[in-house]
Amino acid sequence: MKPILLFNIQFVLSLAAFTLIGLWYVVPWLAKKPREAALQPLVWVHAFRVIGGTVLAPGAVAIGVPILFQKMVGYGDLITAFLALVALAALRARSSWGIPLAWLVVVVGLLDTDAELPQITEA
């Protein structure tokens, strides 16, 4: 079996499993919570994007990885993680800025991920 076919099968099956977990367990559980409380677990995922910053450390990635890509991934993930922590604090405090900050986390994280995709597919 070609590696790309195997990767696609694994990806589709994982996506299906996570979709079912989300639909059967996460969505019903979050639906019972107030909006600020329901957003917190979803934003927590982004708080751990600090790990993406490791690509900025010398020797952390192969020499062939372009420095521009390393900076996009590293700084994009660090900024998203920082915004997620600020949004979590605001949501927890029920600040009027909590929900707009949660949206900012999603937008910045999406732009960061979207900026990375063309680099990955070209390699």
Image (cartoon, rainbow, N blue to C red):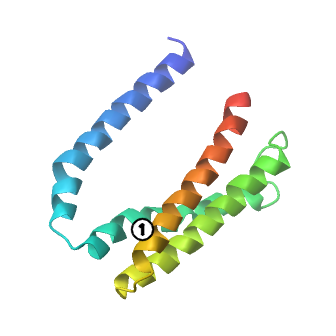
Q: How many marks?
A: 1
Locate the C terminus and report the quarter of the image it occupies. top right
- The three-letter code of the residue at mark 1 reads Trp
Apparent side of residue 29 relative to residue 99 in the rendered image (left or right): left
Q: Is residue 68 above or below residue 40?
A: above
Which quarter of the picture shows residue 28? bottom left
Residue 5 percent coordinates (x, y): 49, 17
Residue 82 percent coordinates (x, y): 58, 73
Residue at (23% x, 55% y) in the render: 26
Element carrying mark 1: helix
Apparent side of residue 57 relative to residue 49 in the rendered image (left or right): right
Which residue is under mark 1? 44
Residue at (44% x, 62% y) in the render: 45
Residue at (14% x, 67% y) in the render: 32
Dot 1, crowdedness within 10 Å: few (<14), some or many (≥20)?
A: some
Q: Can I make out residue 31 in this image?
A: yes
Which quarter of the picture shows residue 117? top right
Q: Can I make out residue 123 in this image?
A: no
Residue 31 percent coordinates (x, y): 18, 62
Q: Is residue 82 above or below residue 69?
A: below
Residue at (26% x, 49% y) in the render: 22
**Front in this rendered view, residue 87 or 13:** 87
Apparent side of residue 22 relative to residue 119 in the rendered image (left or right): left
Which quarter of the picture shows residue 91? bottom left
